[in-house]
Amino acid sequence: LGLGLGLGLGLGLALAIVEGGATMQNGQSPASARSMAMASVSPARSRASRSSLSMHCAEEEFMTNALSVVVLGASGDLAKKKTYPALYDLFVNDLLPRHVTICGYARSHKTIEEFRARIGEKLAGGTDAEKAEFLSRCEYFSGGYDSQEKFTELAGRLTEWEAAQGATATANRLFYFAIPPNVFLDSAAMIKAAAVSPTGWTRLIVEKPFGHDLSSAAALADDMNAIFSEDKIYRIDHYLGKEIVQNLLMLRFGNSFLEPLMNRDHVATVQITFKEDFGTQGRGGYFDSYGIIRDILQNHLMQVLSLVAMEAPVQVAGAASSNAIRDAKVALLRCIAPVALDDVVLGQYVADGAGHAGYLDDATVPAGSVTPTYALACLRIRNPRWDGVPFIVKAGKALDERKAEIRIQFKDAPAGSFMFNDQAIARNELVMRIQPDEAIYLKCNVKAPGLKSAPLTSEMDLSYKDRYAEVYSPDAYTRLLLETLRGNQSTFVRRDELLHSWQIWSPLLEQIEGLRIEPIPYVYGTRGPAEGDAMVKAKGFVRDATYAWRKREALGKL
């Protein structure tokens, strides 16, 4: 079986720019403005060394126009650890214009030197000169999230910085909400009142959580849409920026051998797993208000499930893809029944006796908390393709390894045992490893080498580190920031998609919390409650205990 996987890295989409001989507001032609933007690229990074993507991006409007990126909550951990490193990655790979202004906004009072020193700690890669150049483009502004006076001052500064960028007279503005949800609406209202771009686009990237349940999510979505239309709002779920997740559509619909197998006639079970090998690490107070279902299952794993199971969208690339992909995801979510309590296993980790504390030992966790740190749920998709196939989503903290994967197990080979003289024939599995060490492999049966005729489970393996070691493959936040600048919303969560996901999970959460259901204890560093493995087995998954992948050390255990 030839695996012509044709992996779409999602990095080389060229956009045609129609110039039409137009003249910019400052009298420059688009071509001359583009030349100026290209000339501002650091000499250390020659045009010949750029990737094909950076050369395509150099032709796009966000590279030639003035650009301001405003990071709200710039003094927080998210901005320091994720947002600014992603912006720096874009910058050193020529995927941000050299003239960009990046302004941090927060309530904390900091000097520009203090602020640059703080964000500089997490900037990796590039040269010292590139790091210094990037930090020179970073500004800081202190103010409240509900202060129209401060946002008016900010808008004045942005206008000054944009005028000094030497780009076109069109100025685009991106606001990144690295802030708690309780100040989303205040910030959005102040931006709308005082800081939208008068000449270009204004876009908002909004971080999860998007509500606490269906009613709060609907209220937040309605209130945000009353300020900004849906086409301006980019709800970010970083799992949609991960390499394997972005490859799902190419893998499914770009390979003729696979799509005909993706249905109830051939698939026995589908598992989507997220495992962390550490606990709350002193942040249990924050986690306790959400729990593992809200934190992982309702958003990250539902995004992955929808891409695995949805019908083919009209387009997966091009101008129509932003809504076509999300339309297909919503159609799939509408077919999923609300999760039943009988199809759920909840757990909470306890100390292992070897120095790892239990969840309730975290001083920030309320005494007697019944918040689960592990959850396994079986979902049912009520459509002709998947009816009867259990989709099992599982997530947990303080487990035996760090891993996120998709595991599609196919049904038994018809009459396999009889044909091979009662020898056990293992089920085929298509495994897509999301993290760490991205990989796609197909578990299949071959004859044992040599003179034996016994069946042996082996794999057709694509490990990204081996096959694409030299390919630039950025972090999920880097990818999603670039997609926002390009105006591609296909990898962001739309309002109706968000609410349909909450409809699946809110009834279960109300039941768990209303009844104060106690989670099953499991020891730190184990697979989780034994009841979880028992439910997976009861739902039809067959675990091959004899199989050991040759890259076990790097890629973990089943």
Image: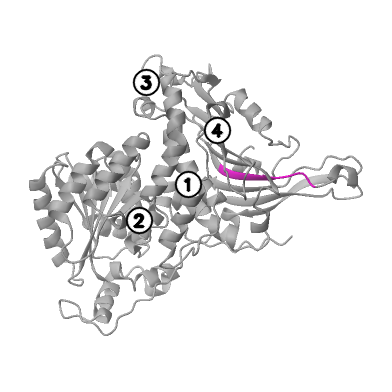
Classed neighbour count for the residue bearing mark 2: other residues with Cα under 10 Å, few (<14), some (14–19), many (≥20)? many
Task: Kindly give the residue lying farthest to the top in the view shown.
Answer: 368
Sequence order check: which comes first, mark 2 or mark 3?
Answer: 3
Q: Which residue is identified by label 2? A: 481
Sequence order check: which comes first, mark 2 or mark 1?
Answer: 1
CA distance for labels 2 and 4: 32 Å
**Type of amino acid at the residue the image marks with label 4:** Ala
Q: Secondary structure at mark 4?
A: strand
- Residues shaded magenta: 405-413
CA distance for labels 4 and 1: 15 Å
Q: Which residue is identified by label 3? A: 365
Residue 469 visible (yes or no)? no
- Residue that appears at 40% across and 67% down: 319
- Residue that appears at 49% across and 42% down: 301
CA distance for labels 3 and 4: 24 Å
The image shows residue 154, relative to residue 283, as above or below, that is below
Q: Secondary structure at mark 3?
A: loop
- 407 magenta-colored: yes
**Type of amino acid at the residue the image marks with label 2:** Leu
- Picture coordinates of residue 399, whole percent (x, y): 54, 29
CA distance for labels 1 and 3: 29 Å
- 327 magenta-colored: no
- Picture coordinates of residue 69, whole percent (x, y): 24, 56
Numbered circle sitting on residue 303: 1
Name the front one of labels 2 and 4: 4
Q: Pointers 2 and 3 in contact (CB under 8 A)?
A: no
Q: Which residue is identified by label 4? A: 377
Q: Secondary structure at mark 1?
A: helix
